Image (cartoon, rainbow, N blue to C red):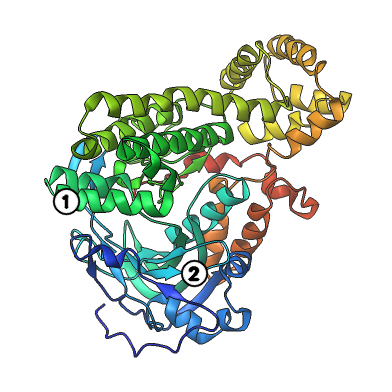
Amino acid sequence: MNSVIGEPLAAIPGLKWANRFARLGTDFYTDRLPSPLPAPYWVSRNQALARELGLDHAWFESQEALALFTGNQLAQGLQPLASVYSGHQFGQWAGQLGDGRAILLGELATPGGPQEVQLKGAGMTPYSRMGDGRAVLRSSIREYLCSEAMHGLGIPTTRALCVTGSDARIRREEIETAAVVTRTSPSFIRFGHFEHFSYSDQHAQLKVLADFVIDHFYPACRESSQPYAALLQAVSERTARLMAAWQATGFCHGVMNTDNMSILGLTIDYGPFQFLDAFDPGHVCNHSDTQGRYAYNKQPNIAYWNLFCLGQALLPLIEVQDQALAALESYKTVFPDALEARMRAKLGLPDARPEDKALIEAAFKLLAADKVDYTIFWRRLCHFGTPQGREAVRDLILDRAAFDAWALQYSERLAYADTGLAADLMLKNNPKYVLRNHIGEQAIQAAKLKDFSGVNTLLTLLQAPFEEHPDHDSHAGFPPDWAASIEISCSS
């Protein structure tokens, strides 16, 4: 759809736009206007994020906002563009990629710092590679809800401001309707941006990009004698902490290509993601991943592999290979320490003891042996200190003798902790609500009939996943049998 976009809207009340990425020059992007959609409508608006961004409430309810966030109209001060990057996909060099269905509107000055605002599904770009540049309602709702779920869980992520829809028909595996999700992030720069300029021997542009990232996001690296190695180390450490958060929460990304890895250590590009139901370390959530490359238990090693690719891309700037390898080594120490810290918090252990690693490993073995529901186990464990609570956890395990042995080991460890403080720590680190595939699917099916109440209910729950929300216990229950038949792929 190549309709001509309308005249720019008036300035949005109280907002200032910048275009720092655009100032890098046209080697880094192509100017691209969004393509309008017919008769757009609101699907859901994230009022909490709107407040954080400083959006005027009345304006966010307006037709002008609807037009802007669908890509039907521009606001003053915007310079829309699609950025170019490359990457490794499923372990193979894929060459030039780029924003095939995402258009960066600009950078918004907010009370919390600059935030880029991007429309996903706003039409074709020079990087669409035979695609239509559109997103469908199903995938847009999944990204909208999951990015906010991750934020509610305290996991670094891009965020989603709103979803708009249109009855325009889009062909995927079947005919679906179009939607646009508005995403925000301090930056959408990926590992693949660096790979693009390194592999094409554009080392001057590679340096411009690295300097941009250091100056705006990693200023402490400038103080190092080797700032580009320091950048690689800082990204490695952020990525290690992100992987620890994913593993502790039971989150599967599904498509950890280098072009889907954020240079800021954020969760980015929600496609075939899944929060574990039954705990299976080898679970593969992406139906397209026939080789199981991105299985849950492989994610930490894949992250390191991707960082190694980033290190190779930065070698023209770092120059000394041993410095790059040393920078990458930090991942191997930060990840296990970060994961153990998160798991101790899930167990209610505020301090570290030598026996904790064995206790955590035994818990994972217990869960894997009986494929116990991951989220429910940890939430019930919050009440382990009462007889009823302990029995509720025990009921999840088929091998009662194995559980009793672990429970004894756990009880002995808890003896060193304040029981009340332990329970409080656990309730703050073991969510009651995660975005399970089946509850997302139910909300999507209702949304296809223009009933968006399920989407908005989930948004409320997922923004506060550690709270009880007693009227919504059904959203925290065991998945129905049909949930196992849901297939999600790279088109999701």
Q: Residues within 10 Å of mark 2 (few under 14, many from 20)?
A: some
* Residue 5 image point, x, y percent: 31, 85
Question: Percent x, y for residue 230?
Answer: 36, 36
Closer to the camera in the image, 313 or 34: 313
Q: In the rendered image, which quarter is residue 133 located in?
A: bottom left
Q: Residue at x 18, y 38 (%)?
A: 316
Mark 1 belongs to which amino acid?
A: Ala
Q: Which residue is mark 1?
A: 204
Estimate the x, y position of residue 245 in percent, counting from the top left.
54, 36
Res. 312 in view: yes
Total labels: the figure holds 2
Disc number lying in front (2 or 1): 1
Side of 322 where 175 appears, left or right? right
- Residue type (three-letter) at the residue carrying disc 2: Ala
Instruction: Check the image and report above or below for 410 versus 340.
Output: above
Name the N-terminal-most of marks 2 and 1: 2
Residue at left offset 61%, top offset 30%: 342
Q: Tell whether label 1 touches label 2 (CB within 8 Å).
A: no
The reply to whether residue 373 is in sight is no
- Element class at badge 2: loop
Residue 109, labelled with which disc? 2
Quadrant for residue 199, please give it.
Answer: top left
Image coordinates for residue 2, horizontal then vertical, percent: 24, 80
- Front-most of residues 285 and 425: 425
Who's the residue at 55% across and 24% down the image? 337
Q: Is residue 116 above or below residue 32?
A: above
Element type at mark 1: helix
